[in-house]
Image (cartoon, rainbow, N blue to C red):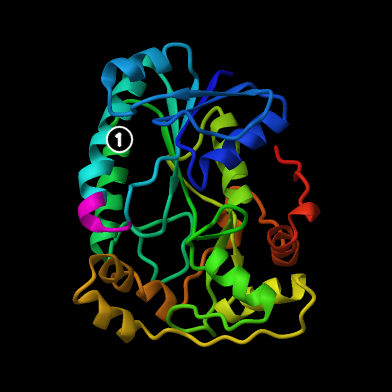
Amino acid sequence: MSILVIGAGQIGPHVATLLAERGEAVTVATRSGSGPEHPLVTRTRLDATDASALDRAFADVDVVHLCVHASAYRPDVWGRELPPLERAVLAAAERHGVHVVYPESVYAFDTNAPLGTDLRVAPRSALGRIRATLLERRAASTARTTSVVASDFYGPGAAMAHGGDRMVGPAASGRTVRPLGRVDLPHAWTYLPDLAAAMVAAADATAGPDVVLAPVVHASQHELALAYARAAGRDDVRVRAVPAWALRAVGVVNADVRAMAEMSYLFTEPLLVDEGATIMPATPLDVAAAAVVDPASRSTVARP
């Protein structure tokens, strides 16, 4: 199988590295030519909105993992950057018979009940409406697509995620962790290496649904912070939440914070996923937290 990973942000490097570690040759394409260093990873430059460049890149490819992020976490930026990118990629995939695998978020879906096999599109934000439009276009394409729905990221490379570096550093060093919203509610989290494994498994499958759920663990924000603290040898963690109303107040004059405030319902209500409906089991929380706090403890998890 010939595999192309487009994008080298939070997700792309995990997908490429997992493929390379199981002996697959993989090409990582970005505008800058960046990507993980591995003997089986080839790095190249690509403008994924350029139809002729995509035709050249897709000519001998079976699977594309489209792992490109927008340049800012705002609806205006997402609306400007993501639809043209996906239109170009889908058109190229249709011309060349390529299977496109996407990391997807929960933003487009109804989160009032646990997410399971019967996912209902019901966005509650501007960002969610953009995600819903992208999912609709994938479903209408003649190309085969698989969207792997992940919850909030944690793990190596989750730089600005709610459960990522902004939580890891304070929890591991004994400083106060300042998460958003309620810290005592159950919340589904996706470990980035698990998301990569789920995307690879979706690509390996000869058939399957258009939308699948990535592995998750459930933990409150306090419990996740405590897992990081314990991985660093600490018995407790100090947590002081930033209330959603404070984000909304700042969002009046700051577009980036306004976008984050609109998504705050994910942290002021429970976020649940039916773990039996996910594509594979998740890495246990304590194992994942240890791998984040102490990279030397990481080991490659055997995946199908």
Q: Is residue 191 above or below residue 265?
A: above
Q: Nearer the viewer, residue 198 or 43?
A: 43
**Which image quarter: residue 87?**
top left
Locate residue 201: give its quadrant. Answer: top right
The N terminus appears in which quarter of the rendering?
top right
Q: Nearer the viewer, residue 119 or 201?
A: 201
In x, y percent, where is residue 255?
A: 23, 66
The percent position of residue 121, horizontal first and vertical second, equals: 31, 57
What is the chief secondary structure element of the magenta stretch? helix
> What percent of the width, then of the height, locates residue 207?
52, 31
> Which residues fall within the magenta stretch?
73-77
Residue plotted at (29% across, 35% down): 85
Q: Which residue is mark 1?
A: 86
User: What is the crowding at mark 1: few (fewer than 14 residues within 10 Å), some, or many (at least 20)?
Assistant: some
Report if residue 52 is visible in the image: yes
Please tell me which residue is depicted at 28% across the width and 28% down the height of the picture: 49
Find out whether residue 23 is within the magenta segment. no
- State the residue at coordinates (57%, 52%): 157
The image quadrant where one finds the C terminus is top right
Q: Is 247 positioned to the left or the right of 201 in the image?
A: left
Residue at 63 percent across and 31 percent down: it is: 37
* Secondary element at image label 1: helix
Is 86 drawn above or below residue 229 in the view shown?
above
**Picture coordinates of residue 113 (x, y %)?**
43, 71
Answer whether residue 205 is visible to the viewer in this image: no
Q: Is residue 74 magenta?
A: yes
The vertical placement of 212 against 189, above or below, is: above
Q: Is residue 145 left or right of residue 259?
A: right
Tag 1: amino acid = Glu
Vertical side of 165 occupied by 142: above or below: above
